[in-house]
Image (cartoon, helix red, strand yellow):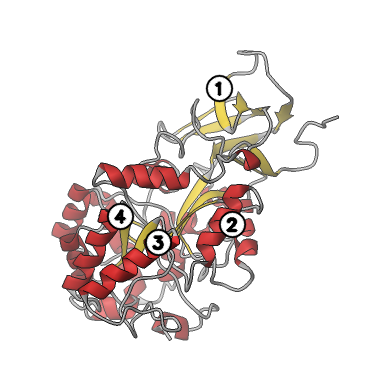
Amino acid sequence: MPKRLERGHRTRLDPRPQALCRSPRTLKLGLIASLMLAPSAPASQGSDVVLRAAHWLDVAAAQLRGPVILQVSGGKITKIGAPGDFAPSGPVADLGGVTLLPGLIDAHVHMQLGGGLPRDNARATLRAGFTTVVDLGATSDVVLRLRDRIASGALEGPRILGAGRWVGKQGGICEFGGIGVPGGPEAYRARVREDVAAGADLIKLCVSTWLADAFSRPEEYEISEAALAAAVDEAHRAGRLAVAHAISLGSVRAALRARVDGLAHAAYLDAATARELRDRGVFMTPTLVSLAGDPRDPAAKALRTAVAAARDAGVRLVFGTDSGVLPHGENGREFAALVDAGIPTIEAIRSATINAAGAYRLGDQLGQIKVGYRADLIGIDGDPLSDVRSLMRPSFVMVDGRVVVSTPGMLPKRD
């Protein structure tokens, strides 16, 4: 059993993160195609409605604006203006004093983990304001099938990009009941092909061990460079992103040599490696609450410092929680952890909106409140720029134009 779980984590298995689309055009097209099969499906789109709210957060400009009315039609935002700027088409939902934000993106979850049924975990995640997630590993294709059922409108949940089974060595950190890869480079290629055939949207690679080992033995990692390179190459050949669990400095360097697209967790970096991550456009997903939450642990403290240094070096931070280790529905706790680690509040919010969408080359559809974008919206009470913890308490959630959370009297009555 992985050491991190032996130290008291409640789940029986364990998780990993995300991806960035920065290489061939096939990566971009494949990912966009798979993501937009989700709640853009007619079965899950809501009816036309106009939303009225006191404020909305322009995440690109870092400005709180308002009051505002938004026209939502066909699952997209079709008009934005001040009250009186246009005649509403459809019923008006007065959201009162809430602040609207883009639907949040959690780029590192595990819907199979953490107890409960995967569908219940998905529902809790959506109701916490996370309208898109990336599932970074399971023991089977169970999450891929959950993704499909949500996309069809049969179940309530966020859009899911799924990695299918973890890809790591036999007996390593991703060995759960015999799913480790028993062999060298060709066996890793075969595993990637199997995951792609099962419908995986991206590939998750387990390169290093956990925090304590990565801190005390910085040059060590558990997958051979030949196997890592073969798996990444096969993923890219199939138009899939390759995301690496790589926490030690040596594992990050190996992942960069293999040309991975993103890091699933925070990692220990030196200045040169941080610059290379930035220059190659490889993102980092910190997962600080689940990975480095103990303030007394020197390894955790060093990791939080490393995240702030990565941000200062210009590495793109993408929000993720390792949910499944962190309870599903408590994803918003990561915002405060990022701010406590020295990340400015607006950048913590951007990591879960504009940064995450951009990392997946979906910045023209998700991550902002703009005309033509998907109608993924959350409403919170107060100003998230002054109280980032308010993001843990959404009073309104809409995914693809369909309302899933509202307070009494917020929505118009229908005949």
Give the crowd class for mark 4: few <14, some 14-19, many >=20 residues within 10 Å: some
What's the mark number on residue 238? Answer: 4
What's the mark number on residue 80? Answer: 1
Q: Marks 4 and 3: in contact by CB < 8 Å?
A: no
Specify which label sits upstream in the sequence, 3 or 4: 3
SS under mark 2: helix
The residues tagged by marks 3 and 2 sit, at their Cα atoms, a distance apart of 27 Å
What's the mark number on residue 125? Answer: 2
| Residue at 61% from the left image edge and 27% from the top image edge | 73
Q: Quadrant of residue 403?
A: top right
* In this rendering, the label closer to the viewer, 1 or 4: 4
Specify which label sits upstream in the sequence, 1 or 3: 1
What's the mark number on residue 378? Answer: none
Specify which label sits upstream in the sequence, 1 or 4: 1
- Identity of the amino acid at label 4? Ala
x and y, in percent, of residue 225 in the image: 17, 72
The residues tagged by marks 1 and 4 sit, at their Cα atoms, a distance apart of 39 Å
- Identity of the amino acid at label 2? Thr
What residue sits right under mark 3 in the picture?
197
